[in-house]
Image: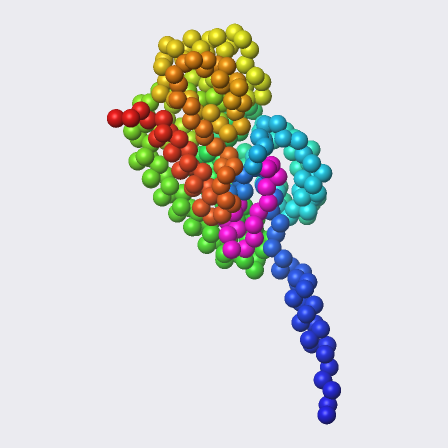
Amino acid sequence: MLKRSCAPCLLAWVMLLYPIAGLAQPVVVTSIKPLQLIAAAVMDGVAQPAVLIPSNQSPHHYVLRPSDVALVDQADLVLWVGEPLETYLTSLVAGVGPESVVIEAADLPGMHLQALGGDALAGDEARYDAHLWLNTANALRIAVALAAELVARDTANAAVYRANLEAFRDLLSRAQEQLRVRLAPLAAIDYVVFHDGIAYFEQEFGLRHQLVMVPDHENQPGVRHIMQIQQMLQEHQPACLLEDVNTNPATVSTVLRDLPVKRITIDPLGHSLSADKQGYALLLMHLADAFEECLPPR
């Protein structure tokens, strides 16, 4: 009886245990959850993008851990907003090796950037509003740039990335239509925001807040500012206050005192959402839910 060689069997096992070079999916690392949601839509069915900042942390005050540095070092592609929001990432991103790709969302061609305060960015003004992911056209531009890099790097899954991009484009179009219908009745509502972090969303869907309770999210308001805000709240009698999930409740209580203002929590970072192909659209829908909650009963 002839004895068959086991070499083909051994080779088959090796191929199962160790991916063939060039077939491994790219490792994508995003800085914040909204970018992870966009990346998850593009990468659906291929791989899961990672995110640096945990759901219980704010990008304004985050301190990188050694594990974060290691994750970025291992990444094939790093997606971040830019220095105004993520100063802590600047030196780390600058040190990424030549074999890796870095996408800075704010620098992408055609991005719509607003100046702080919600106006259009003027000239070479550097201090743009960094919450740019809350504009659906910006989200699509980010997805297009990411898909292009993934197609070039992972040709085996190029068709999947392209199909996912078109599905995301369609999802955004349908979400825009729904949001315009839902938010149109709220255009005349007087409301206050604790932190000016949803201006892109407001501008796109025809909303406008009366005042911002804390203009600088990095600093707590002083006594004079608190007194001014209290007086303005008494004069305007807003329908509600929109405060984000990272707002200090004690600060809000100090400012509001006994004023009868409805407090509604918004989540412009999508902390509670699953990173899947529906996640970004749900982020926008949840913001709309908050505005509808602000609408006075009829």
In which quarter of the view is residue 200 placed?
A: top left
Q: Quadrant of the N terminus?
A: bottom right
Q: How is the image coloured?
A: rainbow
Residue 137 appears at what percent x and percent y? 44, 38
Q: Indicate left or right for 58 with 194 as reference.
A: right
Q: Is residue 133 visible?
A: yes
Q: Is residue 50 magenta?
A: yes
Q: Is residue 71 magenta?
A: no
Pick the front one: 126 or 170: 170
The residue range painted magenta reads 39-54
The residue at the point 39 percent across, 47 percent down is 170
Residue 291 appears at what percent x and percent y? 37, 29
Q: Indicate left or right for 80 with 165 as reference.
A: right
The residue at the point 71 percent across, 73 percent down is 10
Q: Quadrant of the C terminus?
A: top left
The residue at the point 65 percent across, 46 percent down is 75
Q: Furthest residue to the left?
A: 298
Residue 59 appears at what percent x and percent y? 58, 31
In which quarter of the view is residue 50 placed?
A: top right
Residue 35 vertical placement versus 157 (above, below): above
Residue 158 appears at what percent x and percent y? 53, 56
| Count of residue discs | 0
By secondary structure, the bulk of the magenta-drawn segment is best described as loop
Pick the front one: 206 or 18: 18
In which quarter of the view is residue 219 placed?
A: top right
The residue at the point 43 percent across, 13 percent down is 258
Q: Indicate left or right for 198 with 10 as reference.
A: left
Q: Furthest residue to the front?
A: 258
Q: Is residue 110 visible?
A: no
Residue 205 vertical placement versus 6 (above, below): above
Pick the front one: 43 or 267: 267
